Structures are given as C-alpha cells and as structure tokens.
Amino acid sequence: MNLSFVPELVGQTLFSPRAAADRIMALWLPRQWLWTALALTSVLNGIVFSLTLHVGPPRDPEMLQAIPPAFQSPFLFTLFLLGALVITVMTLTWIGRSLGGAGEVPQVLALIVWLQVLRLGVQLALVVLMLAIPVAGVLLVFAASVWGIVILVAFIDRAHGFGNVFKAIAVLVLAVLAVVVGLSAILSVFVAVAMGVT
C-alpha cells in the first residue's frame, strides 16, 4: 500500500475531519486487516504509555498509587485498551444504527484504527516533551483530548451519514455510557488478576 498520502491525511484529519473520514472509508480496507491493525496499535500504545510512566520528572508517589495496577502493567494495559476499543467500535456502530445511522462495523473500525494511529503519534510526542518541557506535555494532552473529541464526533457523523452533529454527539454519549459499563467489568477482572500476581 502506498503510504505517501498519510502526512496529508493527518493534516486533513486535524482541520477537515469529515473529509478525512470520507477518504478513510473510501479505502475499503479488509476487515481482517483492520482488526489486526487495531490489535497492533493497542500493543504499541501500551508500550508507549508504559514509557510515559517512567520518563520525565519524578512522579508524586500518591499520584502513582492512584493509577490502577492494571494500568501500570504494559501487558494488562494493552489488553484493557484492546477490549475498550473493541467495545467502542461495536457500541458506536450499534447505537448509531439504532438512531437511524447507516454505518457498518468495517467503516467505524477503520476510523477508530486511524484515530489510534494518531493517538500513538501524540503519545510519542508526549514522551519527548516530558523529557524536555513537562509543562508542554500537559498542554499537549489537554489539546489532544479536546480536539480528539471534536474529530471523533465528525467521524461518527460521516460514518453513519447523519448530517447532524447533535445525533453524532448523542451516539457518542450513549456509547461512552455503554463502554463505561463494559470496561468496569473488564477492569475489575484485571485488577483482581494484578492483585493475584502481586
């Protein structure tokens, strides 16, 4: 696959997310390839997230204790992240369709995979900034979180063909509630495993 368009797609995602969503979905990437890519990005994000916990200035011990043990283990964090992403893809698809959307799993999956690729880039930039300018790292996390939500809403809107940002927001809110319920069950299992290991 020719990846020369990727830098342009990054810019398009940041400044014209609806057009970027159309472009990504038009690729019609194979479903098996997309699931593999989702797993791979989860592994890479897990590794980089682990790095962010061990670089930069010393952390407040109380802050470190506030992080669940599952999140301090790269392996368990990766499994948790992958589970969260799978649930996210399914809930965004099913809830969107229940509200009149036309999105299918492969379309939503392709968009979520791309967002995870961008998230990986942000995580890598965060590792560098935490070593050089910690305050800039905090600002990056805040900006990426806010703009990431804007992009996700635009992606949901295009995936389901709503043409209505409020419907897309409703899908996102309902999906978040469903994901929280699912992740609560997953997290309880991972915490139990982590406590058993320690």
Image (tube, rainbow, N blue to C red):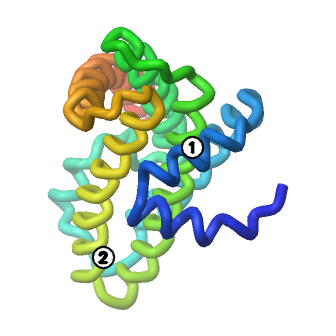
Residue 65: percent from left, percent from top: 22, 51
* Position of the C terminus by quadrant: top left
Task: Please tell me the numbered disc located at residue 173.
Answer: none
Q: Is residue 176 visible?
A: no
The three-letter amino acid code for the residue at tag 2 is Gly
Q: Which residue is mark 2?
A: 137
State the residue in front, 59 or 170. Answer: 170
Q: Helix, strand, or loop for circle 1?
A: helix
Residue 122: percent from left, percent from top: 44, 66
The residue at the point 23 percent across, 33 percent down is 169
Q: Is residue 100 visible?
A: yes
State the residue in front, 129 or 115. Answer: 115
Q: Residue 55, located in which quarter of the rendered image?
A: bottom left
Q: Is residue 114 left or right of residue 187?
A: right
Q: Is residue 27 left or right of residue 193?
A: right
The residue at the point 76 percent across, 32 percent down is 30
Q: Is residue 198 left or right of residue 172?
A: right
Residue 132: percent from left, percent from top: 37, 90
* Position of the N terminus by quadrant: bottom right
Q: Helix, strand, or loop for circle 2?
A: helix
Which mark is first along the chain, 1 or 2? Answer: 1
* C-alpha span from label 2 to label 1: 24 Å
Q: Which residue is mark 1?
A: 113
Which residue appears farthest toward the left when viewing the image? 62
Rate crowding at label 2 as few (under 14), some (14 to 19) or many (20 or more) other CA atoms within 10 Å: many
Residue 81: percent from left, percent from top: 47, 38
Q: Residue 26, located in which quarter of the rendered image?
A: top right
The residue at the point 30 percent across, 24 percent down is 175
Which residue appears farthest toward the front when viewing the image? 163
The three-letter amino acid code for the residue at tag 1 is Val
The residue at the point 36 percent across, 13 percent down is 100
